[in-house]
Image (cartoon, rainbow, N blue to C red):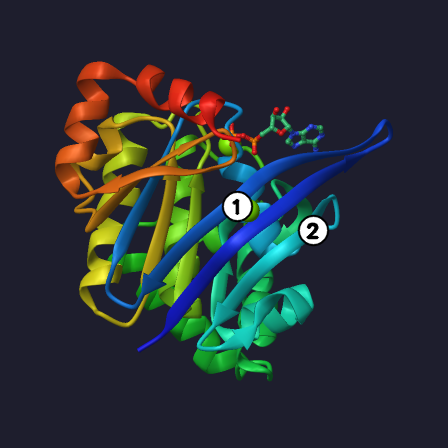
Amino acid sequence: MATLEIKDLHASVVTDEGSKEILKGVDLTVRSGEIHAIMGPNGSGKSTLSYAVAGHPKYEVTSGEVLLDGENVLEMSVDERARAGLFLAMQYPVEVPGVSMSNFLRSAATAVRGEAPKLRHWVKEVKEEMSKLDISPDFAERSVNEGFSGGEKKRHEILQLNLLKPKIAILDETDSGLDVDALRVVSQGVNEFAASNEVGVMLITHYTRILKHVKADRVHVFAGGRIVESGGAELADELEESGYVKYTEKADKAP
Ligand code: ADP
Ligand code: MG
Ligand code: MG
């Protein structure tokens, strides 16, 4: 059992022009076996939340806490966060020319496990996991994310989850074209992953349609830099019908 607790988290983005507060008091607890969907309009700070938890240098936590099984995540380096069992899809670079998937995944596994997996075992492990996800074997030799389709990027994400076996996974489903195939891959992967009861998932998304496939235990509406409403799957249906307007108004009225 693992628990990620985010308590009254405030964070700012640091730019050349100075710093601007984006997260305005986020409270959220995610336990193993649970899928939490974080939904909200563009620009509400959803990605900032994952960057702040990931420890991205551009985002400065100004107050609040992030605890993983009681340990202070905010004091950990990015590698230490991975070793503690946090998986943040974002911490992995978009494209890494010249680095094969196989080597990239082995470095990630080394960071998480604290020692390099034995090469022979590793190759076998990767092959098995790839075949479960219908990933073609030549994928292992391709450069990381270079020329990957949307579906391939998503398969890669789920492959990482299955190999790295984190305690808590934060997946930021950026709004850029998740096609039907990619949607199916990520949804199946997330459902199976959470069903194992060994991992908690925070699924950040703009679109309600992903929740037709992912069985979220809790749905949270994110607006104006914080969670303004929480509920069950029915909340996603309501959002599908009425959109975010009601909630952005609520966020605007907040102090
Ligand atoms: P979401 O993921 O909900 O669309 P983001 O967290 O990406 O929202 O952005 C929240 C706000 O913070 C936006 O107004 C955005 O312009 C601003 N922001 C986020 N990252 C940066 C950055 N690196 N530089 C400048 N502004 C940023
Ligand atoms: Mg506050
Ligand atoms: Mg975003």
Q: CA distance from mark 1 to mark 2?
A: 10 Å
> Residue 151, position in %: x, y?
37, 35
Q: Give left or right: position of 57 versus 204.
A: right
Residue at 59% over, 63% down: 103
Vertical relation: 56 (above or below) 1: above
> Residue 212, position in %: x, y?
16, 33
Please give the residue where the numbered disc 2 appears in the rendered image: 62
Vertical relation: 73 (above or below) 155: below
Identify the secondary structure beneath mark 1.
strand
Vertical relation: 170 (above or below) 20: below
**Disc 1 residue type?**
Gly
Q: Nearer the viewer, residue 186 or 247?
A: 247
Q: Give left or right: position of 228 versus 191.
A: right
Q: Is residue 75 visible?
A: yes
Where residue 126 sits, quadrant-wise, is bottom left
**Quadrant in which ligand 1 is drawn:** top right
**Disc 2 residue type?**
Thr
Q: Give left or right: position of 26 versus 94.
A: left
Q: Nearer the viewer, residue 249 or 126?
A: 249
> Residue 118, position in %: x, y?
53, 84
Identify the secondary structure beneath mark 2.
strand
Residue at 23% over, 24% down: 239
> Residue 113, position in %: x, y?
53, 80
Mark 1 crowdedness (10 Å alpha carbons): few <14, some 14-19, many ≥20: some
Q: Nearer the viewer, residue 202 or 79?
A: 202
Residue at 50% over, 50% down: 89
Say which label, 1 or 2, has the lower sequence index.
Answer: 1
| Residue farthest to the right, as pictured | 16
CB at disc 1 and ligand 2 closer than 8 Å: yes
Q: Is residue 92 visible?
A: no
Please give the residue where the numbered disc 1 appears in the rendered image: 25
**Mark count:** 2
